Amino acid sequence: MDIEELLKLLKEELLLVLGESYGDYKKETKADVEAFLTLSKVKLERWTKLLQAGELTVEDYKWLLGSQKDLLILNALYQAGVSKLRLGHLKNKIIKTIVNTVITVVI
């Protein structure tokens, strides 16, 4: 597994998810997604390798990714007036997208 390729794929998938509802803020949300993936890169790599090796269950992986949710700061959408509730739902959707993408690639 090449972490750089995985991060590139995750970025593409996350931008699609954000584009579904917030296409007008594509440039701004791209920066937020890149920042999150950069901050989480080391952990994502370690956890994904553990998942691939069978040392983590999918549930463990989901939980660990959920612990990173606070690092996911969607400043552009917050500044645009998107409610905290909608941002929370969007963060959950982003975490779910990451899990589904990683599972598809790794398992």
Image: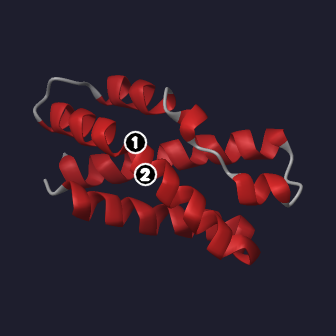
Instruction: Name the foreground residue: 78 vs 63.
Output: 78
- The residue at the far left in this view is 53
Total numbered circles? 2
Q: Does 39 appear above or below 18? A: above
Residue at the image position 74 percent from the left and 60 percent from the top: 76
Do tag 2 and tag 1 residues touch (Cβ < 8 Å)?
A: yes
Inspect the image, locate mark 2, and give the three-letter code of the amino acid beneath it: Leu
Inspect the image, locate mark 1, and give the three-letter code of the amino acid beneath it: Ser
Q: Quadrant of the C terminus?
A: top left
Residue 48 image offset from top left, x and y in percent: 24, 39
Residue 51 image offset from top left, x and y in percent: 21, 33
Q: Secondary structure at mark 2?
A: helix
Residue at the image position 48 percent from the left and 59 percent from the top: 34
Residue at the image position 33 percent from the left and 46 percent from the top: 41
Residue 49, quarter of the rendered image = top left
Using a 10 Å C-alpha cutoff, classify the residue at mark 1 as few (fewer than 14 neighbours), some (14 to 19) or many (20 or more). some
Residue 21, quarter of the rendered image = bottom right
Residue 37 numbered mark, or none: 2
Residue at the image position 43 percent from the left and 44 percent from the top: 39
Cα distance, mark 2 to mark 1? 5 Å
In the picture of the structure, the residue carrying the numbered disc 1 is 40
Residue 43 image offset from top left, x and y in percent: 31, 35
